[in-house]
Amino acid sequence: MRYNLKVRIGILTGVVALIFGFFIFRLMQMQIVHGAEYASEAMAGSVTKQTVKAARGEIVDRNGKPLAVNKIGFDIVFYKEYMPSEKENEVILSLVKVLNGTGEEWIDNLPISKTEPFEFLSGEENESRIKHLKEDLRLNVYATVQNVIDAMVSIYEIDTEGLTPQEIRIIAGVRYEMAQKDYSIPNPYTFASNISTDTVARIKENNVSLPGVDISENPIREYVNWNLAPHVIGQIGPIYKEEYDELKEKGYQMNDSVGKSGIEQAFEEYLRGKDGEKEITLNSSGEVIDVEETVAPVPGNTVQLTIDSDLQKVAQDSLEKQIKYLRENEPSGEGGDADSGAAVAIDVKTGEILALATYPSYDLETYKNDYEKLRTDKRSPLLNRAVQGLYAPGSCFKPIVATAGLMEGKITPSHQVFCGGTYRVFDAYQPHCMHTHGYINVINALRVSCNIFFYDTGYNLGIDKVNQYAAGYGVGLPTGIELPESTGYMASPETAEMLGQKWEEGDILQASIGQSYTMISPLQLANYVATIANRGKRMESHIVKQITNYEEDETVKKTEPVVAHEFKDTVGAYDAITEGMIEASSYSGTSGATFGSYYAEHGIKIASKTGTPETNSEAYQNSTYITFAPADKPEIAVAVVIEKGWHGYTGAPVAKDIYDYYFGFTKEPADSEAQ
């Protein structure tokens, strides 16, 4: 019995010794053999990836002149790995004081006024933000501004003692924005963008008291001329929460910027670069011990537009000048009420848009601050009238009816219609002409814009045949432009029904002179007259010439000319139409006051057509004008629309300024008074 006990004790002792021996061996192995490796692992608590932002691609004009570029700017950035959470509110307030001292702003999109009495911001855009704000804070829809601020004070642990209500609002606004941008180690937060070097110096002076704050050099979007073609170029902006669900699937982060309008939005996928990546290694105490860039960023592509920036400026300046001239020099009802318009210039052979002007316009630099004023302006300066405005073409529509009449054999160049001042085909509806022209053919009918001739031609064709040719010219159809556009519609029984109206027998007459229900954009007008200049070949319009890589030494995508439709002219229709439009530009024509001497002075023949369409309200008349030149060897087509311009010829001076610059007769818009 005692022997067995000794044996068991011996065995137990041996086992214990083996266990201790094993642990001693492992300890020696850990400390001596793998000591450095395990020490490193103990120090390295985690590795986090952080995005390295890529530069956005640039936008240039057809000649390579920069329109939207990148410059190096200084941003104030919060890095969570260096900023203790309990210091966040203190750091925010300290930075705000610095920026107030230098007169600069920080990012704050909270939809609450920044000064007392605090109120929710107004406007459609803010309504959505207020809704999301209340949802994020888990407040009901009836929550007041004070309810919202109180909730943020609690959530963000803002110690209100010693703080003014405005300081509380400031901290809350920044903290909410940080939350919206998913502030974290992988996502540093940009507190302020594009700050001055003076502010940079002050921040660095306070660096010790501002943990986690750093100055980052980043590419900043800059528009070379803030007033040039803002509707075309567009702008970029922050990603809002309501957009993020869709954009995150494309690899965007909440703190990214994205194209909001114009080319910036339409070509976002090309302009957006490919972000890089860096790895941040933290030890077990959360301290940074290593930073390494593992993937280099790739800048976005360069988008080259078809517009000529100098010609664009001429078009913009001339349009504004002419509208102001009419307001200052003409009586009400004769152009004195003119307040807005558009001008478009197109390359006849390719469909390239050379200029796309809208008035009134806005300044990209002050857009954010001016937004509410712009949004409520009755003249709608945010509307890109050149592509989204819809207007009755008026007598500018008459060449379409002439085309149909000639090609369908209803008229010939020598065919005459008697104009006695009134068209009497219907008993109940007998519209008039502006003058009594007697017997008149298509060439002279275009020269003097005789309504009777085109009433008769349209009546004999019928609305379906008129619309067949109108569609061939692109009326009511997309032009091909890469920006959002309004396509309009043609007068027809179906259109009347769509608009809640009844098609009357006399509507065919009004449709034949560009009235009734026909609505067309200035770009469509320009493309239509370019088709006449191109003798029936309609090209798709486009505003992007090509896309290259950032260095512009490799083509990514190139826009080739596309024929959208082609009329087969076997009867010499375009000879007659062009002759009539040349006559309209002569001294005896409807725009003779502007172009009567142009050929004698410059050796260039101008083809044109005026229009004075009535609006639906009949309270005023617009001015529409189409033209191309040189008439015998066309290169450029122009359309001008002036709302409340009253007479078609009031758009002619704008076209003349465009021609003068295009053909090299002036280097700047005409300095003389518009007429």
Image (cartoon, rainbow, N blue to C red):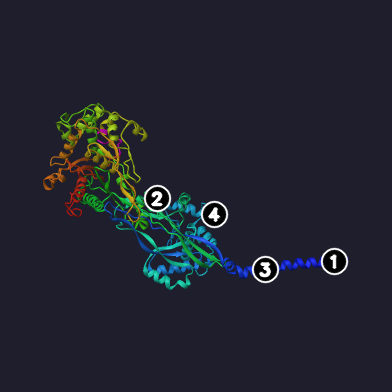
- Secondary structure state at the residue bearing disc 4: loop
Give the extent of the magenta segment: 511-519
Report which residue position mark 1 lands on.
5
Image coordinates of residue 178 in percent, x first then y, are 48, 60
Q: Earlier in the sequence, mark 4 or mark 3?
A: 3
Q: CA distance from mark 3 to mark 2?
A: 60 Å
Image coordinates of residue 333 in percent, x first then y, are 23, 44
Cβ atoms under marks 1 and 4 closer than 8 Å: no
Majority secondary structure of magenta residues: loop
Q: Earlier in the sequence, mark 1 or mark 4?
A: 1
Image coordinates of residue 38 in percent, x first then y, are 59, 67
Name the disc covering residue 269, or none: 2
Question: Which amino acid type corresponds to the residue marked 4 in the rendered image?
Answer: Arg
**Along the line of sight, the residue nearer the viewer: 179 or 46:** 46
Report which residue position mark 3 lands on.
25
Report which residue position mark 4 lands on.
138
Q: Earlier in the sequence, mark 4 or mark 2?
A: 4
Q: Is residue 553 visible?
A: yes
In the image, residue 264 above or below residue 20: above
Residue positioned 53% across, 59% down in the render: 151
Question: Around disc 1, counting alpha carbons within 10 Å, would you say few (fewer than 14), some (14 to 19), or many (20 or more)?
Answer: few
In the image, residue 410 above or below residue 672: above
Query: Mark 4 or mark 3, which is nearer to you?
Result: 3
Q: Earlier in the sequence, mark 1 or mark 2?
A: 1
- Secondary structure state at the residue bearing disc 2: helix
Question: Around disc 2, counting alpha carbons within 10 Å, would you say few (fewer than 14), some (14 to 19), or many (20 or more)?
Answer: some
Q: CA distance from mark 4 to mark 3?
A: 58 Å
Q: Is residue 69 magenta?
A: no
Residue positioned 69% across, 66% down in the render: 22
